[in-house]
Amino acid sequence: MGNSILGLSVSGLNAARANLQTTSHNISNVNTPGYNRQEVIQNTNISLSSDAGFIGGGVRVSTVQRIYSEFLVTQAQQAQSKSSQLDTHSAQISQLNNMVADSSAGLSPALQNFFSSVQDVATNPASVPSRQALLNNSEALVTRFQMMDQRLSDSRAGVNKQITSTVGEINTLAQAIADLNQSISLAEGQAGGQPANDLLDQRDALTMELSKLTNTSVVQQSNGAHNIFIGNGQPLVVGAETFKLKAVASPQDPQTLTVGFVSGNNTILIPENQLQDGGSLGGFLAFRNETLDSAQNALGRIAIGLAQTFNDQHRLGQDLNGDLGGDYFTVPTPTVISAEGNDATSTITAAISDVGALTTSDYKFDFDGTNYTLTRLSDNNSVSTTVLPSNAAPLTVDGISITNANINANEHFIIQPTRDGANEIALAINDTAKIAAAAPIRTEASITNTGSGTISAGSVNPPPIDANLQQPVTITFHTPFDSQFDVTGTGAGLPANNQVFTAGEDISFNGFTVQIDGNPAAGDTFTIGPNTNANSDNRNALLLGELQTQNILAGGTASYQSTYGQLVSQIGSKTRELQVTSEAQANLLAQTNQSLQSLSGVNLDEEAANLIRFQQAFQASSKVIEISSSLFDSLLRI
């Protein structure tokens, strides 16, 4: 009987000691990140049969388990991944929003100063200081474009660095998780299948850290190992084996880094849309693909639109030297990138045929052996032709024309029509005398006219400029008057006789257009000729100033300033959206972590109570041993 009681007491002591040790372990790790509270699982020993029934055999400790919810942990990992993605995207776009919306450093004040100088030249066309101020503000505008583009390019370079750094961290964490898979398998094997709780906690903590970097899927294997997948099912960790990621230059744009999956000696690119949904890596990719690319393209579109349309009008004017106006700005050209794998001799020519039709998208031109296709990458809309694009038969979409195509089957090119527009815009003149503020033609009614007819100042038709623009042209009304006139001079279609007169209707020859109003009389003459000694003429300067408010861009729906305003508004709206969504996701993450902590976290009050409870159990088992010893002594004294 004494040995039986001792055995029961020893089992109780062992169980109490295990509980005390586990409680002490919980208290020691109260501040350890990722630690899950542990508890001892006890079972009764096999009872022994006797005449009086089954006599209890004491207690045994079957295992020490973590208080753990796979469902809550998975929720926390998903919430953490999304929260990291939103926080990263929000932080990046906030910097961009601060730049474009800056009332002093943005594009708006530079545009306003530039057109104010144009208006000043229109007011004082012969003033050299006014002309010099225009050149100065033009240079300031160009510098502002270039400065803002440099900020965007710096942001792009920063994203590249972050992608490289994040991919390195992902690989490091993946290796650590794979090592823990192996350690857990060995430890549990040596312990007869008992869970290696602390190692399991470490692996879960590393998996949570990995979720901060990228969206992951965790699949638990029958042997306890965690296999981890990213993207659309690419394996990152399988048991004790890891598969590396690598930051590589995009084959479509060498300046852009993307993520590849290393398989043997090959690197397989992972589509970026599969990585954008989670983690800081997804945040960087989403920022670049959804905001940065379109913002840089939008700024370039404004620069190209301004340069081209201002040049078009400037060439319709006349400078102080009496020459027709030349290019005022250097107009950037589309960037064409030959895809990796293209033949070195394959080339195409891309040009902007209509700045008003430009979008903020990039394009892909490819040849499948039969069809030549130009695709807008923002929505994958495309146009195709079976005819080789050439100067005589260009392939055109959204104001982009492809000519001189020398391309083999299954090759493609990426066209970025506006990406470098803000960086490459430049001022083409530096001489105040070359500002074409005047109109190149002058109209005049003969002083001998007897009728009330008046002729307009005339306007120059859009390019191409007629070579005979400044050749003198005379309009003479018939005698006797029959509402017809003859046009004489040098140029295409001249002389032109018996033209029917209608007051106020356009009369166009040699690249100019005039209108005659009133009631001309028989023999009245009107002349259109070169505008000599025209230092004080401001007609073209006025037309240049009117460009500020004309809806030129975005298919003729927006001015330069309103187009920039749309860019500021879009970025501002997206910034606010991300801030709100990020805060909401952070609250969801906090709630999930709170639920997880309430289940698995260490409660010091509870553990203190457990210490007392298990101490009393230990003391009670010790008391049973004392009683057993006393009973044994009594038996010996009989």
Image: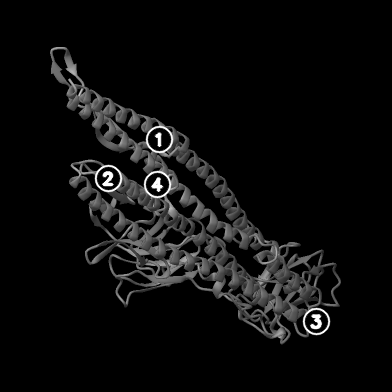
Q: Quadrant of the C terminus?
A: top left
Select label 4 or label 3 by which is in front: 4
Q: Is residue 309 left or right of residue 318?
A: left
Q: Quadrant of the N terminus?
A: top left
Amino acid type of the residue tagged 2 in the rendering: Ala
Amino acid type of the residue tagged 1 in the rendering: Leu
Q: Earlier in the sequence, mark 3 or mark 1?
A: 3
Discs 1, 2 touching: Cβ within 8 Å: no
Distance between the alpha carbons at the discs numbered 4 and 3? 75 Å
Distance between the alpha carbons at the discs numbered 3 and 1? 94 Å
Select label 2 or label 4 by which is in front: 2
Select label 3 or label 1 by which is in front: 1
Q: Earlier in the sequence, mark 2 or mark 4?
A: 4
Distance between the alpha carbons at the discs numbered 1 and 2? 23 Å
Select label 1 or label 4 by which is in front: 1
Residue 100, position in %: x, y? Answer: 62, 62
